[in-house]
Image: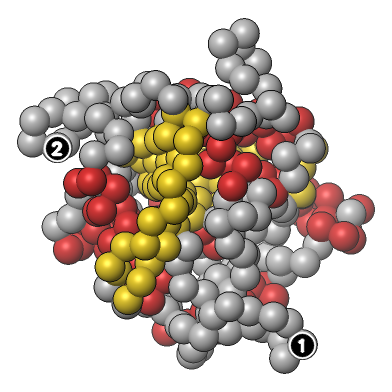
């Protein structure tokens, strides 16, 4: 960590300020939390927490700690409290009762709002973790299709991008077998998660719901992307497949694996790997070109 970067256990109001706002979103009230460095930042990031599409909130570590960590590194963050799907099990608590495309549309709306509202003076990235990575990716495809503002960079942490997920290769399968606690995102579990999100069969998912099925031709306008997967995580299968398709489409893709991690490592800030991933993401965001007067990157 550089000498100019606050340590992650001492990020306070002295380094950032926060503001809770409620936007007039496409499906009603849409809460967001804005994290601003004390000095005006050039780059911005719209961020979406994970939680299997049905859980999670702005206060979980994958939401609040991540946003504070980025803001302490000079990046304005807009964290989005998108609407959630119903709980997977009757005994599980969920704040949600909606299905696709509600959260996807809210994510795209929030990005458009951030770009035009002015909390950052430079380029905007769009990203998320796990299911949030799916939503950021699908919403980017939505913005491309609808002629909206396009992110300068996609920032994806261990995303899930396929509703029908292939089996892992032998090396990952062996690693999962050696760590049964990490082995909970197999094809059947992923299918069930998506069908709960979709409200219908996994095979009915379009590219904005399951971006991993997109073809190279459908991704030719996708922005440069940085993706960091967890090491012992079956969702790596969909992330790496999507990265390969981006590469085939000629998109600038930086895909890597954070060593020694299982799924959700940004939700465990006590692990050094969480800060390591934040540092790599933040460096890419900070390097974005400034905006031109037309609102696109120079």
Question: Horizontally, is 29 left or right of 175 in the view?
Answer: left
Query: Element at badge 1?
Result: loop
Instruction: Tell me the residue at 58%/84% (across/down).
Output: 86
Q: Nearer the viewer, residue 134 or 187?
A: 134
Q: Nearer the viewer, residue 261 or 93?
A: 93
Q: Which of 246 and 258 is in front in this view?
A: 258
Say which residue label 1 marks.
91
Find residue 294 and report its horizontal and vertical position in percent: 8, 36
Q: In which quarter of the image is the C terminus?
A: top left
Q: In the rendered view, tell whether residue 261 sits above or below residue 284.
A: below
Q: Of marks 2 and 1, which one's residue comes earlier in the chain?
A: 1
Distance between mark 2 and mark 1 Cα atoms: 47 Å
Q: Nearer the viewer, residue 258 or 3?
A: 3
Q: Residue 295 carries which label?
A: 2
Question: Horizontally, is 90 left or right of 59 in the view?
Answer: right
Query: What scheme was used to colour the molecule?
Result: secondary structure
Query: Element at badge 2?
Result: loop
Instruction: Tell me the residue at 66%/44% (across/down).
Output: 266
Q: In the rendered view, tell whether residue 78 sits above or below residue 103.
A: above
* Dot 2 crowding, Cα within 10 Å, few <14, some 14–19, many 20+: some
Q: How many marks?
A: 2
């Amino acid at each position: 960590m550089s000498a100019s970067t606050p340590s992650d256990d001492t990020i306070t109001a002295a380094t950032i300020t926060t503001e809770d706002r409620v936007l007039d979103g496409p499906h009603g009230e849409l809460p967001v939390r804005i994290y601003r460095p004390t000095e005006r930042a050039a780059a911005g990031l719209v961020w979406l927490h994970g939680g299997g599409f049905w859980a999670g909130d702005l206060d979980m570590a994958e939401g609040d700690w991540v946003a504070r960590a980025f803001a302490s590194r000079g990046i304005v963050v807009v964290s989005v409290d998108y609407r959630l799907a119903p709980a997977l099990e009757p005994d599980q608590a969920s704040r949600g009762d909606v299905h696709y495309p509600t959260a996807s549309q809210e994510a795209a709306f929030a990005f458009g709002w951030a770009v035009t509202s002015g909390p950052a003076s430079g380029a905007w990235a769009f990203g998320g973790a796990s299911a949030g990575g799916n939503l950021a990716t699908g919403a980017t495809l939505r913005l491309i299709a609808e002629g909206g503002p396009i992110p300068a960079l996609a920032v994806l942490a261990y995303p899930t991008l396929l509703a029908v997920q292939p089996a892992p290769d032998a090396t990952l399968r062996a690693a999962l077998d050696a760590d049964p606690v990490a082995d909970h995102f197999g094809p059947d579990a992923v299918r069930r998660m998506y069908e709960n999100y979709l409200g219908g069969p996994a095979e009915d998912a379009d590219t904005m719901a399951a971006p991993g099925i997109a073809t190279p031709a459908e991704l030719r306008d996708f922005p440069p992307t940085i993706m960091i997967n967890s090491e012992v995580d079956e969702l790596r299968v969909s992330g790496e497949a999507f990265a390969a398709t981006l590469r085939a489409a000629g998109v600038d893709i930086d895909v890597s694996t954070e060593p020694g991690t299982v799924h959700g490592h940004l939700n465990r800030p006590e692990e050094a790997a969480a800060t390591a991933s934040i540092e790599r993401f933040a460096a890419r965001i900070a390097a974005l070109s400034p905006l031109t007067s037309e609102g696109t990157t120079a």
